């Protein structure tokens, strides 16, 4: 479980990185990127940045490569805008929770359709 300080630093990094990626990056590999969350290590020296990318697998791969190559640039900008003793090392990870949620929703819809069809086929008992 994350400490209060870890959550605060994570939220701060989330806000700042979202703004930096939107306004300060000119890398063509970075298409439609959304920062969905940031997990910070207990010593506040490592941060795992979760992102979602609009596009196919090729777009995702190139976006992750672009973000990884720009990590030191992002740290430089964070150092200028934040008053933290240490600016964490950034590692970018794809957030698959949205895709997983959509998959679960599709499965639930399929089950509901099957149960509705089964309910229509069974004769009702008028006793």
Image (cartoon, rainbow, N blue to C red):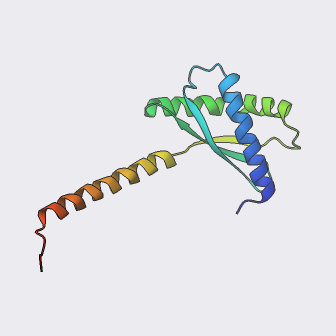
> In the image, is 110 to the left or to the right of 20?
left
Residue 8 against residue 22 in the figure, above or below: below
In the current view of this chain or complex, which residue is farthest to the bottom? 127
Decide which of 94, 126 is in the foreground and name it.
126
Tell which residue pokes out farthest to the front in this image.
127
Is 35 left or right of 4, judged from the image as shown? left
- Where is residue 71? Give x, y as percent: 70, 33
Quadrant of the rendered structure where residue 66 is?
top right
Q: Quadrant of the C terminus?
A: bottom left
Report if residue 34 is visible in the image. Answer: yes
| Residue 70 shows in the view | no
The image shows residue 32 at horizontal and vertical percentages of 54, 28
Q: Which residue is drawn at 74% across and 35% down?
A: 16
Residue 95, by quadrant, is: top right
Using the image as rendered, state which of residue 123 and residue 30 is in the foreground: 123
Image spot of residue 94 (x, y percent): 55, 42
Residue 114 falls left or right of residue 96:
left
The answer to whether residue 60 is above or below residue 111 is above
Quadrant (top left, top right, bottom left, bottom right) of the N terminus = bottom right
Residue 5 horizontal/vertical position (percent): 81, 54
Residue at horizontal 50%, vertical 33%? 60
In the depicted view, which residue is nearer to us: 100 or 30? Answer: 100
Total number of numbered labels? 0
Against 42, residue 18 (above or below) is: above
- Residue displayed at 62% across by 21% down: 27
Name above or below for residue 39 compared with residue 122: above
Q: Which residue is drawn at 85% across and 30% down?
A: 80
């Amino acid at each position: 479980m994350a400490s209060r300080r870890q959550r605060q630093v994570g939220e701060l990094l989330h806000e700042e990185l979202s703004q930096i990626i939107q306004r300060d990056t000119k890398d063509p590999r970075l298409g439609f990127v959304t920062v969905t969350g940031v997990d910070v290590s207990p010593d506040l020296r490592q941060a795992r940045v979760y992102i979602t990318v609009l596009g196919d697998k090729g777009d995702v791969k190139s976006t992750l490569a672009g973000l990884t190559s720009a990590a030191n640039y992002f740290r430089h900008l964070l150092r200028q805008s934040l008053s933290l003793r240490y600016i964490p090392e950034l590692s970018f990870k794809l957030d698959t929770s949205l895709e997983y949620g959509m998959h679960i929703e599709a499965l639930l819809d399929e089950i509901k359709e099957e149960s509705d069809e089964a309910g229509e086929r069974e004769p009702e008992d008028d006793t």
